[in-house]
Image (cartoon, rainbow, N blue to C red):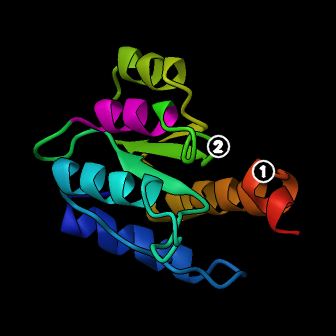
Amino acid sequence: MEDNSSDEFLLRKALADFPKKLHIYTINDGQAALNFLSDIAHDSAQSLPKPDLIFLDLHLPSVRGLDILKDIKRRVHLNEIPVIVLSSSLNADDRAAAYSLQASGFIRKSFTYQEFKSQLHKAMAYWTDVVDLPHHAQAS
């Protein structure tokens, strides 16, 4: 969930080099993100794609990223999805608030591109290769 088209481009470019095939969906408005998450939570036929990992910007139009994170973590069918906060904020309170709401990670966007890409790949590798999440274990 990213509202800045330049940041979205860099995120997509960095993830394009990730060794696993990814399906990337971008939502650039907070209310649209909440609507999408609500639809997933209520989709009994599971026709909507449930994310394996969410990258979440803190500063989205309409609804703050922290409010979206809170919404994700309160929903039983979504709360196991890792949420990595991406932010250009240098405010320690933003990072603390994200972790207090059960964010799975916090990556600052103020790196050089190579550092940003490296951080994204490390996060992706951890959440796709190392961790055995509950919804993955049920699918086996």
Provide residue 103's location: percent of width, then percent of height.
Answer: 54, 33
Q: Which x, y percent locates residue 29? A: 18, 55
Cα–Cα gap, marks 2 and 1 = 7 Å
Task: Sort mark 2 into few (<14), some (14-19) or many (20+) by Cα contacts within 10 Å.
Answer: some
- Disc number placed over residue 53 in the picture, else none: none
Query: Which structural element holds mark 2?
Result: loop
- Work out which quarter of the rendered image holds the C terminus and state it: bottom right
Q: What residue does disc 1 label?
A: 133
Q: Is residue 109 visible to us here?
A: no
Q: Secondary structure at mark 1?
A: loop
Residue 74 image offset from top left, x and y in percent:
48, 30
Image point 25% across, 54% down: which residue? 35
The amino acid marked with disc number 2 is: Glu
Name the quadrant containing residue 118. Answer: bottom right
Residue 80, percent across and down?
64, 43
Residue 48 visible? The answer is: yes
Instruction: Say which residue appears at 33% left-offset and 69% top-offset.
Output: 26
- Whether residue 65 appears in magenta in the rendering, the answer is yes
Which of these two is toward me, 82 or 37? 37
Residue type at the position of mark 1: Leu
Q: Judge whether 33 appears above or below 20 on screen.
A: above
Is residue 70 within the magenta segment?
yes
Q: Which residues are magenta?
A: 64-73
The residue identified by callout 2 is 80
